[in-house]
């Protein structure tokens, strides 16, 4: 960390001066044989990787019509080129979204289009050489799949989907990334990203009960594996021990306590995160989601609520219905999905975000707050990419933006927005999402945080902001790591339910 420096803030955020090759040597650690094989991938790069990669690409192009459209539709207008935080921070032209897509598009042209087969040079088509494969590995692991670029593309081309396809192809030939694949292996084996076994979780939860009792004098429970509970809370495992995540877990527990809601965590499904989406692998995505279904069925819960985790909420909101039968559209031929459909209480949204739960309870006048408890904070809100651009909350357009803000305003007196072109659907990624929250990519992570740090600095200077709330476990972990490099106090970042926890009045209703 000592030699990692934050890039200088830009006076006027214009298109950066290009630094070709600036990040070409930055390579996330490659997964070992053991890690890859645990997920059913080849252990290491197979001898016939070229043919297998092209075959897998062909399969993905036929399966996902969107991918073929993205390969064909780009007119190189450049509207996306300066919209990526990694390009802004690194100045490497290959981190422009259009250039990132072209890494795959050039190979697509060579093998899947007639002009590319006949006149490759004329149409910018390239053979898939080992050099190109390495370039894919490096630059598709410098994309956090945040989808900001797609907001600005007139054709809606989604670079995140191209990145997912590239990672899926890389895994299929034994060239997987250590960080994501190792984490998925832990979820399969133990139940969460951190590899925390059930007894360790029980200890942590018991310790939290004691801490909250000492702080508030109230017996707030943190139950685990309680059969017949109303709500199953699925939350990122970082909430169990990491700072500031744990303060939000305390906030959820206080909300459940204050509203008299019976709830439980699950030792088997002790993880909301689903890194299957990061590696673009449907089978892994489904396998991880099925743990949650199994836990819900075994515990007999009526509702499933998801904690503060950006991509987990995207997976829950957008994919759980077809992956596991939570929500509308469950597979009529999937017996377990249908069992779950019968079991869940459809008077409530399934699944529901914890912010929706809390906001609903505030609307029912079931919670009371002492807003002055948050008066030491001047608060801003960082929209997390997967919540902002991959999901929704509530039953109105933009609910994913309004509901967390509404909660903050209900529990605190001082709220300030950051610059409008950097929030809501145009929000900048924290710089650590999409499977990049690993120390081997710390240089990229620091540089990728630049646009968010610049606008945070503005509200700090102009309004004295001293707290940036967010509802994503990855954003919290990334910011606490990189903010000190930009000269901020790491305690400036925290969850929305951390603020709820500060202000909630227990035992009032
Ligand atoms: S990191 Fe985000 S903005 Fe950059 S290319 Fe990937 S999806 Fe687009
Ligand atoms: S904005 Fe869309 S069409 Fe234009 S260069 Fe980017 S991806 Fe291509």
Image (tube, rainbow, N blue to C red):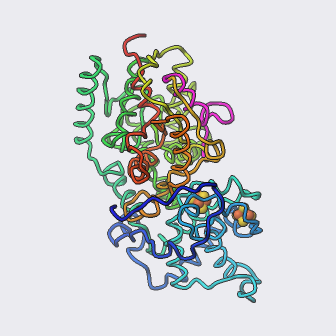
Furthest residue to the top? 509
Ligand 1 visible in quadrant: bottom right
Using the rendered view, name the quadrant where residue 253 is placed: top left
Say left or right for 309 vs 10: left
Which of these two is toward me, 262 or 389?
389
Q: Magenta stretch: give its range.
A: 390-412
Whether residue 39 is visible to the viewer of this picture, yes or no, is yes
As for residue 258 lying within the magenta part, the answer is no
Whether residue 269 is visible to the viewer of this picture, yes or no, is no
**x, y percent for residue 287:** 45, 53
- The answer to whether residue 138 is above or below residue 156 is below
Using the rendered view, name the quadrant where residue 19 is placed: bottom right
**Quadrant where the image shows the C terminus:** top left
**x, y percent for residue 155:** 76, 59
- The answer to whether residue 232 is above or below residue 19 is above
Using the rendered view, name the quadrant where residue 226 is placed: top left
Which of these two is toward me, 227 or 48?
48
Report the predominant secondary structure element of the magenta stretch. Answer: helix
**Quadrant where the image shows the N terminus:** bottom left
Which of these two is toward me, 175 or 140?
140
- The answer to whether residue 390 is above or below residue 171 is above
Q: What is the number of callouts on the image?
A: 0
**x, y percent for residue 119:** 75, 89
**x, y percent for residue 30:** 39, 71
């Amino acid at each position: 960390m000592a030699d990692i420096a934050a890039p200088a803030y830009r006076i006027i955020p214009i298109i950066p001066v290009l630094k070709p090759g600036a990040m070409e040597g930055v390579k996330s650690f490659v997964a070992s044989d053991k890690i890859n094989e645990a997920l059913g991938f080849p252990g290491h790069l197979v001898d016939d990787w070229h043919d297998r990669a092209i075959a897998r690409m062909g399969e993905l192009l036929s399966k996902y019509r969107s991918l073929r459209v993205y390969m064909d539709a780009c007119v190189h207008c450049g509207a996306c080129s300066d919209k990526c935080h990694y390009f802004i921070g690194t100045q490497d032209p290959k981190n422009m979204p259009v250039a990132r897509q072209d890494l795959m598009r050039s190979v697509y042209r060579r093998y899947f289009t007639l002009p590319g087969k006949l006149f490759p040079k004329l149409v910018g088509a390239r053979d898939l050489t080992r050099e190109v494969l390495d370039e894919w590995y490096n630059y598709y692991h410098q994309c956090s799949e945040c989808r900001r670029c797609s907001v600005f593309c007139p054709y809606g081309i989604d670079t995140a989907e191209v990145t997912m396809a590239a990672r899926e192809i890389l895994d299929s030939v034994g060239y997987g990334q250590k960080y994501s694949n190792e984490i998925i292996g832990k979820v399969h084996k133990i139940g969460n990203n951190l590899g925390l076994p059930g007894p360790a979780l029980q200890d942590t939860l018991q310790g939290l009960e004691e801490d909250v009792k000492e702080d508030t004098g109230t017996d707030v429970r943190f139950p685990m594996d309680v059969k017949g509970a109303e709500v199953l809370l699925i939350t990122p495992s970082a909430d169990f021990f990491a700072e500031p995540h744990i303060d939000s877990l305390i906030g959820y527990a206080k909300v459940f306590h204050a509203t008299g809601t019976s709830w439980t965590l699950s030792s088997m499904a002790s993880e909301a995160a689903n890194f299957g989406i990061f590696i673009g692998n449907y089978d892994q995505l489904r396998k991880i989601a099925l743990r949650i279904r199994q836990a819900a069925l075994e515990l007999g819960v009526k509702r499933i609520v998801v904690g503060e985790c950006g991509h987990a909420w995207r997976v829950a909101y957008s994919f759980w219905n077809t992956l596991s039968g939570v929500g509308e559209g469950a597979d009529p031929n999937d017996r377990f999905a249908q069992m779950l459909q019968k079991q869940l209480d459809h008077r409530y949204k399934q699944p529901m975000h914890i912010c929706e739960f809390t906001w609903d309870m505030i609307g029912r006048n079931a919670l009371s707050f002492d807003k002055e408890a948050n008066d030491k904070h001047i608060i801003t809100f960082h929209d997390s990419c997967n919540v902002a651009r991959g999901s929704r909350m509530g039953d109105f357009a933009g609910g994913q933006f309004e509901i967390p803000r509404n909660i903050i305003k209900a529990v605190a007196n001082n709220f300030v927005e950051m610059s409008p072109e950097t929030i809501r659907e145009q929000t900048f990624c924290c710089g650590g999402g999409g499977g990049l929250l690993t120390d081997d990519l710390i240089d990229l992570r620091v540089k990728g945080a630049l646009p968010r740090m610049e606008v945070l600095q503005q509200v700090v200077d102009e309004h004295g902001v001293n707290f940036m709330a967010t509802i994503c476990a990855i954003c919290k972990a990334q910011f606490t790591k990189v903010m000190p490099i930009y000269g901020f106090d790491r305690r400036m970042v925290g969850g929305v339910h951390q603020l709820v926890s500060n202000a909630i009045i227990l035992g009032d209703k």
